[in-house]
Amino acid sequence: MRQNKNKIIQVANLIEELSWLLESNKSLSLNEVAEIIREQSQLTNSNLTNKVASKYASSNPNKQFLVGALPALLQDNSLFKSNSEMLDFAEDVLKLLPSRAAKRSRTEYIGWIICEVSSLNDKDLESLVNSLSAIVGDEIKLKKMKAAKKEPNFSWNNTIQSLGE
């Protein structure tokens, strides 16, 4: 019983001190203080994100597009039914030389392709990026590309160039 009484007195003293602090700082409301703390927290997170992004992000918009778009494109099982088809794309379109003897998983090959994109020549990438962005953003063109893959003389480069116009 005695402990409860002491706790009640401590709580009353705390409320009284808090009340006094609030009264003495009428220029700031608790809502404003909370908002200032939230803004500072967001600025700190934003600054950290910007530092990381500026250190590791490519200044090349073509490479940024490919790093963002290729994973989804390469994971499309209706477009790339096998690792071999995906590697054909990497060789024909990106001019990469993947090791087919490595027997990697689909995810490992995709990771390898994405990493290799960062070392490609921008001049070669510009027309590819323009064509791919036109295709990836258009369901009809994407369906046409899937249909073209079934043709006997299918060529990634020709198909991408024709659909990307």
Image: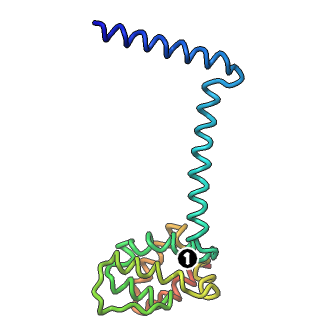
Task: Tell me if 9 is positioned left or right of 57 in this view.
Answer: left
Q: In this orientation, which residue lies closer to the viewer: 109 or 88? A: 109
Q: Secondary structure at mark 1?
A: helix
Where is residue 12 shown, x and y percent of the image?
Answer: 47, 10
The quadrant the C terminus occupies is bottom right
In the shown orientation, is residue 49 left or right of residue 151?
Answer: right
Q: Which residue is most to the right?
A: 27
- Front residue of 151/83: it is 83
Are there few (<14), some (14-19), or many (20+) residues within 10 Å of tag 1?
many
Looking at the image, which residue is at 63% across and 76% down?
60
Q: Nearer the viewer, residue 89 or 118?
A: 118
Q: Which residue is mark 1?
A: 132
Residue at 35 percent across and 78 percent down: it is 108
Residue kind at label 1, given as amino acid type: Leu
Residue 50: x and y in percent read 60, 60
What is the image's colouring?
rainbow
Q: Position of residue 14 (x, y in %)?
A: 49, 16
**Residue appearing at x 58%, y 39% in the figure:** 38
Q: Residue at x 43, y 93 (%)?
A: 97
In the image, is 158 to the left or to the right of 152? right
Q: Identify the image quadrant of residue 130.
A: bottom right
Q: Tally the marks.
A: 1
What is the quadrant of the N terminus in the image? top left
Across and down, in percent, residue 27 comes to 72, 23
| Vertical placement of residue 61 versus 150, above or below | above
Q: Is residue 78 above or below residue 15?
A: below
